[in-house]
Structure formats: structure tokens, C-alpha cells
Image (spheres, rainbow, N blue to C red):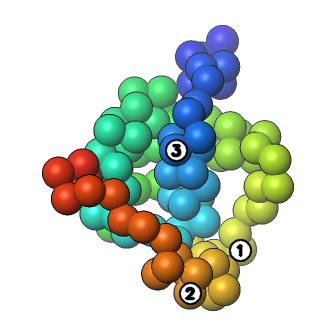
Amino acid sequence: MLRGQTAPLSPNEEIVLRRIALGVAQPEDLSIRHVRRLEDLALIRRNKTGLELTPLGWSRYEALPRATRPTNGTGDPLTRALMQFLPRPPENDTF
């Protein structure tokens, strides 16, 4: 069994996983520490435009409570609008 399937995620790592899945965050808005941990667990990977979930990451995301799979890479308009009100990580802890 892959470690990424069973390793516990902190609440903040779960939030980063959700944001990447929904496409509502820019990489520079995410904590580099949480991004690295999700990469180590093979839940996310870098692509040409930023970050994306791996197949294992999608499986893990869909197992989260209230997880919804987006229909496209742009994310829900309401969620994107609300993201502007969430606090950003400290400058020295960004991607």
C-alpha cells in the first residue's frame, strides 16, 4: 500500500490538497512546506502551469468529507471569489 493513501494529513495539508484539486489557488499562495509534504506523499506533482493532483491524490481527495470533483480546471466561480478573503501564508513560507 502506498504511503500517500494512509499517511495522516494535517488540516492545513488537507486544505492545500483541496485548493489544488479545485484549482482555486495559485502556487505562490500555498505554503511551500505543505506542498513539499504532499509531493513527498505522491499526492501532487508539478506541471507546466503549476500543481496538479496525481491519480493517488485524486483518490485521497475524493475520500475527504464533502469533496466534489470540479468539471474543469478553473474551479467554482463562488469559491474563487471567496478565496480572495482567505489569509495568505507568510512571505517566507510560500511556494
Q: Is residue 68 above or below residue 75?
A: above
Q: Which mark is residue 5?
A: none
In primary-sequence order, the first of circles 2 and 1 is: 1
Where on the picture, by quarter, is residue 45? Answer: top left
Q: Secondary structure at mark 2?
A: helix
Q: Residue at x 51, y 41 (%)?
A: 13
The residue at the point 46 percent across, 81 percent down is 84
| Res. 37 visible in picture | yes
Rendering quarter of residue 5: top right
Q: Are marks 2 and 3 in contact (CB under 8 Å)?
A: no
> What amino acid does circle 3 point to?
Asn
Q: Dot 1 lies on which element?
A: loop
The residue beneath circle 2 is 81
> In whole angstroms, how far apart are the C-alphas of marks 2 and 1?
17 Å
Where in the figure is residue 55, as x and y percent of width and height?
61, 41
- Residue identifier under label 3: 12
Task: Determine which of the numbered discs, if any, sits on residue 71 in the image.
Answer: 1
- Furthest toward the right, the residue is 66
Q: Specify which label sits upstream in the sequence, 2 or 3.
A: 3
Relative horizontal placement of residue 62, taking residue 17 as reference (left or right): right
- The disc labelled 1 sits on which kind of residue? Thr
